[in-house]
Image (cartoon, rainbow, N blue to C red):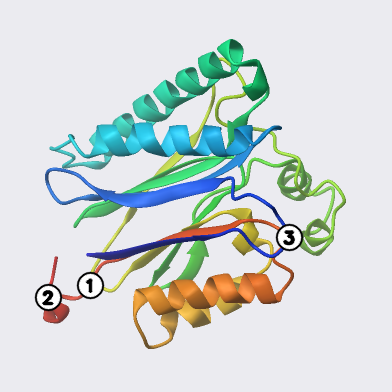
Amino acid sequence: MKEVFQTDRGKVRLHNEDAGGVFINLDGDRLAIVADGMGGHRAGDVASEMSVSHLKQEWEKTKGIKDAETAETWLEEQIKKVNEILFDHALSHTECDGMGTTIVAAIATSLFATMANIGDSRGYILNESGFKQITEDHSLVNELVRTGQISKEDAEHHPRKNVLLRALGTEKTVEMDIKTITFEEGDLLLLCSDGLSNKVSETRMKDTLLSSGLLEEKAKTLISLANENGGEDNITLAIVEFLEAREGGM
């Protein structure tokens, strides 16, 4: 497999409250993470960085993720643990009161990919069937779309587009969505914060990922597109590619 992680402050924000990375466990499996922090007094970057740091630490000493059930259990248990850590930290540090973060995390093995998400950071897959969003946004606007109260077109410009219904660390307990999909040679996973998905259409994402060139160049192009379209938010993405055997296998 091959992977890339890139983050950019954008053109407007003074600080980057996003965090993430792609990490390798003892078996060589990948864990890709994107976290988009929120909260006053720069507490957002505390929440996102603490989340990524814990998951990285736990993942790098993990092995034996051989099936979807094991992967799903690992993500659920570790993300719930992160939620406790963040919630307790906010209680004991007044400057972090109300902090939280979105998270999208994907375990990628040679047989499958398991993805968990909370909030509106997204996960996509590019495979022989096309380019598809795997995750569901936990946002007010997406709930209005899902229940038929507004159209997808209305959602693009809704004044409350950034209102989240779920976040990591803001409540004592948290619910997440977890899905497992087939991950095969030639497939590609994209995880991103809304700084990318709000500014770059799925068509442009797909075209960029399908273009020739290195993964690093594709990631850089996606960030450039988001900045060209305003760059009002931090922009973060991770890409994991299942290389075909002729390119060196895993």
Name the amino acid type tagged 2. Answer: Gly
The reply to whether discs 1 and 2 touch (Cβ–Cβ < 8 Å) is yes
Local crowd size for mark 1, using a 10 Å CA cut-off: few (<14), some (14–19), many (≥20): some
- The residue identified by callout 3 is 12
Frontmost of labels 3 and 1 is 3
Labels 2, 3: front one: 3
Identify which amino acid the numbered label 3 is placed on.
Val
Residue type indicated by callout 1: Leu
Quarter in which the C terminus is drawn: bottom left
Q: Residue at x 80, y 64 (%)?
A: 153
Dot 1 corresponds to which residue?
A: 243
Res. 186 in view:
yes
Task: Determine the CA span between mark 1 and mark 2.
Answer: 7 Å
Pick the front one: 123 or 180:
123
Separation of residues labelled 3 and 1 (CA atoms): 36 Å
Snapshot quadrant of residue 53: top left
